[in-house]
């Protein structure tokens, strides 16, 4: 016996990926409803070998459904998540709306699966920001061994993090570079993204950081340990899929790079590809379509007593969004709902 599952936002990049991953991981689904806004109503989406026609999110009755994966943005989530939750359907939300709510668990299953027990307060579970999700998978096993004091991270985030419009803009601007008669002005991004990098993701805050950078700070503290100090610089790069991060950590106890490498090799959700030779590391192109978070370029930081540097790469549409949501559903099903 399986679950009655809803995917809200099924026609978007993340929603489609949720459907793919539910099928790939053979999540026990008895019935699946693909929901969309009225402008996408009737669009067909794939779920394994099935073709589903989207239903209207606005009129959908969540009564009797077990789990709803939401990929519809904060504004729509604010309207529909309480409706689903009140009907007894557990919402796993990919937006930022509930991430910082103390009554809503923020879950990365490899890191803090036990926190899922708190879901019952609102019948909602939050999925973290894409850049945070992959980083904390790598930080947690190192923190358990040597207690991380401080993290300095610079991100190199793909345009798919900004949705289909971001991917279209990179594609159109790239073509325009080779066609002098065509000019594609920035619309989704603040400056040209093709053949450029933009040190600005989300809105600016009073202290000069961006909301994306603040998210990494706040979410790392909530997921792993509130005592960890985090400073982030988030950059949009002309890559279609796959976020990369250059991470520097300072630990309370000394952690040798070889031991750190061994710890990460044994940690769930991580693949270590770290050869000190040409091409002995993973880049975004190679991580696309994979479930793992890849670690490369692990080395001691000689400028501080207990420091390490590493390179972290993951498919942001998967681990950063859809995969993590499905993994949460798996934990929820195994530990809480327990059908079958």
Image (cartoon, rainbow, N blue to C red):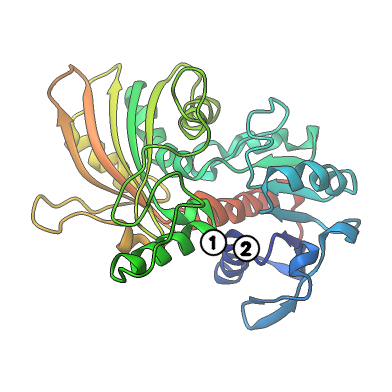
Q: Which residue is mark 1?
A: 164
Q: Secondary structure at mark 2?
A: loop
Q: Which residue is mark 2?
A: 12
Image position, residue 271 (x, y; %): 32, 53
Label whose residue precedes the other's in the sequence (2 or 1): 2
Q: What's the residue at 74%, 41% (across, down)?
A: 124
Q: Which mark is residue 244?
A: none
Circle 2 residues within 10 Å: few <14, some 14–19, many ≥20: some
Question: In this picture, is 80 found above or below 258?
Answer: below
Toward which corner of the image does residue 54 lie, by quadrant? bottom right
Residues 240 and 148: in front is 240
Q: What's the residue at 61%, 56% (across, down)?
A: 326
Residues 40 and 255: in front is 40
Residues 244 and 47: in front is 244
Image marks 2 and 1: residues in contact by CB distance under 8 Å: yes
The reply, left or right, for residue 233 in relation to residue 97 is left
Q: What's the residue at 32%, 35% (across, down)?
A: 154
């Amino acid at each position: 016996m399986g679950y009655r599952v809803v995917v809200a936002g099924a026609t978007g990049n993340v929603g489609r990926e949720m459907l793919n991953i539910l099928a790939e991981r053979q999540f026990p689904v008895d019935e699946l409803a693909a929901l969309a806004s009225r402008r996408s109503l009737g669009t067909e989406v794939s779920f394994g070998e099935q073709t589903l026609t989207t239903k209207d999110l606005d009129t959908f009755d969540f009564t009797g459904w077990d789990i709803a994966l939401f990929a519809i943005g904060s504004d729509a989530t604010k309207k529909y998540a309480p409706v689903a939750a009140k009907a007894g359907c557990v919402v796993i939300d990919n937006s930022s709306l509930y991430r910082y709510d103390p009554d809503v668990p923020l879950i990365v299953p490899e890191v803090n699966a036990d926190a899922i027990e708190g879901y019952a307060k609102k019948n909602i579970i939050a999925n973290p920001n894409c850049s945070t999700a992959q980083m904390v998978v790598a930080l947690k096993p190192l923190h358990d061994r040597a207690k991380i004091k401080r993290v300095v991270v610079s991100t190199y985030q793909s345009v798919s993090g900004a949705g289909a419009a971001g991917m279209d803009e990179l594609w159109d601007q790239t073509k325009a570079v080779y066609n002098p008669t065509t000019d594609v002005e920035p619309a989704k991004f603040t400056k040209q993204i093709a053949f450029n990098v933009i040190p600005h993701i989300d809105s600016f805050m009073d202290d000069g950081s961006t909301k994306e950078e603040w998210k990494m700070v706040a979410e790392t503290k909530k997921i792993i340990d509130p005592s960890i100090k985090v400073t982030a610089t988030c950059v949009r790069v002309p890559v279609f899929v796959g976020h990369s991060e250059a991470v520097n950590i300072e630990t309370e106890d000394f952690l040798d790079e070889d031991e750190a490498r061994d710890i990460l090799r044994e940690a769930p959700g991580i693949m270590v590809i770290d050869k000190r030779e040409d091409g002995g590391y993973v880049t975004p192109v190679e991580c696309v379509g994979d479930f793992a978070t890849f670690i490369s370029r692990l080395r001691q930081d000689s400028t501080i007593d207990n420091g390490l540097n590493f390179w972290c790469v993951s498919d942001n549409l998967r681990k950063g969004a859809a995969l993590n949501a499905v993994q949460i559903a798996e934990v929820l099903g195994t530990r809480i709902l327990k059908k079958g």
